[in-house]
């Protein structure tokens, strides 16, 4: 058990304080930057705008913008097509929610059909856990505090 906690330690520090995952940031990182970090997507990737990557510790789904996007409320920035819009990380070894040291007061709790979501729109993170064992199913990283508005090219 002690070994497992040391393996999960990097998740504790990278999970829930910002919406950046392994140097990949929604509405900032490009597909070229993602592929430099993660390599080529797996053949099972469903489309040009959604790619699946495999790392040693997790499966990573990256969604890319379909057209140009802007944030609402606007910060004046226009985000080009094929920029990361969200990152879904599915750990191979599911840590317990308690292993993440999540400050639950900073997150909105949503119970939904056997799954509990801990959402923080201000930071741009949602943690999904199994309600029966509180094991982390996935962590979703998305643009901070804003709604994205995209238009097809």
Image (cartoon, rainbow, N blue to C red):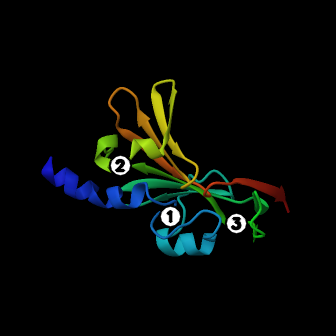
Label 1: state its secondary structure.
loop
First in sequence, mark 3 or 1: give its number: 1
Q: Nearer the viewer, mark 3 or mark 1?
A: 1
Within 10 Å of disc 1 (Cα), the crowding (few <14, some 14-19, many 20+) is many
Q: Residue furthest left?
A: 2
Residue 28 in sight here: yes
Q: Residue at x 40, y 54 (%)?
A: 58
Residue 44 position within the rendered picture, expressed as x and y whole percent measured from the top left: 56, 52
Check disc 2 and report its element: helix, strand or loop.
loop
User: What residue sits right under mark 3 in the picture?
Assistant: 82
**Sequence-first disc among 1 and 2:** 1
Mark with earlier residue (2, 3)? 3
Which residue corresponds to mark 1? Answer: 20
Label 3: how many Cα within 10 Å (few below 14, some 14–19, many 20+): many
Q: Which tag is nearer the camera, tag 1 or tag 2?
A: 1
Residue 75 occupies which quadrant of the picture?
bottom right
Q: Are marks 2 and 3 in contact (CB under 8 Å)?
A: no
Q: Where in the figure is residue 6, as x and y percent of width and height?
A: 20, 57
> In the orientation shown, which residue stands out farthest toward the front?
105
Q: Which residue is mark 2?
A: 92
Residue at 34% x, 57% y: name it: 11
Q: CA distance from mark 2 to mark 3?
A: 27 Å
Q: Is residue 43 left or right of residue 58?
A: right
Secondary structure state at the residue bearing disc 3: loop
Q: Residue at x 73, y 55 (%)?
A: 148
Q: In the displayed structure, would residue 74 be above or below residue 133?
A: below
Q: Is the residue under label 1 in contact with that under label 3 (CB below 8 Å)?
A: no
């Amino acid at each position: 058990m002690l070994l497992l906690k040391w393996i999960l330690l990097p998740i504790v520090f990278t999970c829930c304080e910002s919406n950046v995952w392994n140097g990949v940031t929604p509405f900032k990182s490009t597909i070229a930057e993602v592929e430099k970090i993660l390599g080529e997507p797996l053949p099972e990737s469903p489309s040009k705008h959604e790619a699946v990557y495999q790392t040693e510790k997790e499966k990573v789904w990256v969604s890319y913008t379909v057209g140009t996007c802007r944030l609402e409320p606007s910060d004046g920035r226009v985000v080009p097509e094929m920029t990361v819009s969200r990152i879904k990380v599915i750990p191979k070894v599911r840590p317990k929610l308690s292993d993440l040291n999540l400050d639950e007061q900073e997150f909105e709790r949503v119970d939904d059909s056997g799954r509990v979501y801990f959402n923080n729109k201000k930071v741009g993170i949602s943690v999904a856990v199994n309600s029966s064992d509180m094991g982390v199913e996935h962590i979703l990283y998305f643009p901070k505090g804003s709604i994205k508005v995209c238009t097809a090219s």
